[in-house]
Image (cartoon, rainbow, N blue to C red):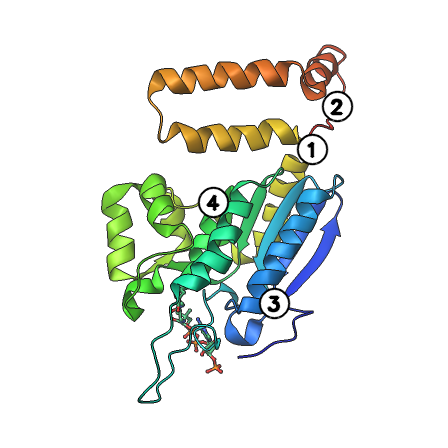
Amino acid sequence: MSDSPETAILISNEGAVRVLTLNRPAALNAFTAAMLAQTRAALAEAAEDATVKAVLITGAGRAFSAGQDLGDPLVKPDTSPDAAPKDIGHLLDGYYIPLALQLRAMPVPTIAAVNGVAAGAGANFALGCDLVIAGEGASFIQAFSKIGLIPDCGGTWLLPRLVGRAKALQLALLGDKLKAAEAASIGLIARAVPDAELMSEAMAMAQKLAAMPSRALAETRRLIDQAMDQDYEDALRMEAMMQSQLGFAHDYSEGVRAFMEKRSPQFKDR
Ligand code: T3D
């Protein structure tokens, strides 16, 4: 399904929160190549804008995202008898890997507000955000096995880390729909809330993070990710090294001064 390249991602601001809305509702916000490129551009723009302190990502219509658009010429199998099979690995190299890495390296927190179904790469794009909050009507589907693929867009890395091997395999092999409430109860996502409250709760979360020290939040994410592959002593030493760096930064002295002076801090490091 084609779409106007200008409108596949809607961009707006609410204070210091940049809101990105995946916007191909007729195709459940499935990602075309153009939409993936626009998502990357929108994230890069948010990363470069010093006034942006948190990024909130949601979907237009009844879905968050149904993953890769299976009708996109980039991946749609050519059924003519003498057609050579397409190498869909290029799609990952060229689009999903850069997108997943970019999300992980954002200088500000990212929040996915999952408003409906999140399937395939759409689910893993959401799970790659720092915090995931979903409406009770939303669901998560590792749809890959049903079309003969493996979980991508970080799925094989994210799932066992979020929910452990047994649940990761259950979700990835069976490809069943997991409702938001169960996703929250097994630790796949942070919270499930009534659908009517999703955007206000997600925005409150984003505004809270936007008022916090961005650099400390981004380094917290980085160290937690690294610690998954470190032994205890290496993690302790990494904490000391980072704490030393942050101790010289503006936000630490401002945070301590504001506490002593019983006022709200004005953080500015990124
Ligand atoms: O080549 C590669 O694929 C490599 C890349 C892999 C990354 C991936 O993300 S692989 C996984 C791709 N996604 C899927 O396999 C999910 C496919 N979609 C579904 O299983 C279902 O649509 C849902 C469970 C997500 C929702 O079901 P339902 O019943 O609520 O909606 P629906 O009727 O199936 O879909 C509504 C419309 O969206 C429909 O179009 P139409 O008939 O109204 O014109 C449907 O074709 C379209 N749609 C849904 N998902 C996709 C899509 N169009 C293109 N690509 C999609 N992924």
The residue indicated by pointer 3 is: 23
Q: Is residue 51 above or below residue 139?
A: above
Residue drawn 38% across the image and 42% down it: 187
Q: Quadrant of residue 82?
A: bottom left
Q: Nearer the viewer, residue 78 or 261?
A: 78
Numbered circle sitting on residue 264? 2
How far apart are labels 1 and 3 at the CA level? 28 Å
Are circles 2 and 3 on residues that touch, CB within 8 Å? no
Single out the mark in the foreground, 1 or 3: 3
Front in this rendered view, residue 88 or 182: 88
**SS at mark 2 in the image:** loop
Position of 30 with respect to 10 (left or right) is left
Are the two marked residues, 2 and 4, in contact with CB atoms closer than 8 angstroms? no
* Place of residue 97 in the rendered image (x, y in percent of width and height, measured from the top left): 47, 52
Q: Are marks 1 and 3 in contact (CB under 8 Å)?
A: no
- Specify the label residue 191 is tagged with: 4
Q: Nearer the viewer, residue 137 or 163?
A: 163
In percent of width and height, residue 129 lies at 51, 46
Could you tell me if the residues under marks 2 and 1 are in contact, i.e. CB atoms within 8 Å? yes
Q: Earlier in the sequence, mark 2 or mark 3?
A: 3
Amino acid of disc 4: Arg
Work out whether residue 117 can be spotted.
yes
Instruction: Name the spot of residue 252 as percent of width and height, x first.
Output: 67, 17
> Which numbered mark, 4 or 1, is in the foreground of this view?
1
47 left or right, relative to 36: right
The residue at 34%/76% (across/down) is 85
Ligand 1 rendered quadrant = bottom left
Compute the Cα span from label 2 to label 3. Answer: 37 Å
As measured in the structure, the alpha-carbon distance from the residue carrying label 4 to the one carrying label 1 is 21 Å
Residue that label 1 marks: 211
Q: Work out whether mark 2 precedes mark 4 in sequence or the reverse, and give the earlier one.
A: 4
Residue lying at 58% horizontally and 30% vertically, measured from the top left:
217
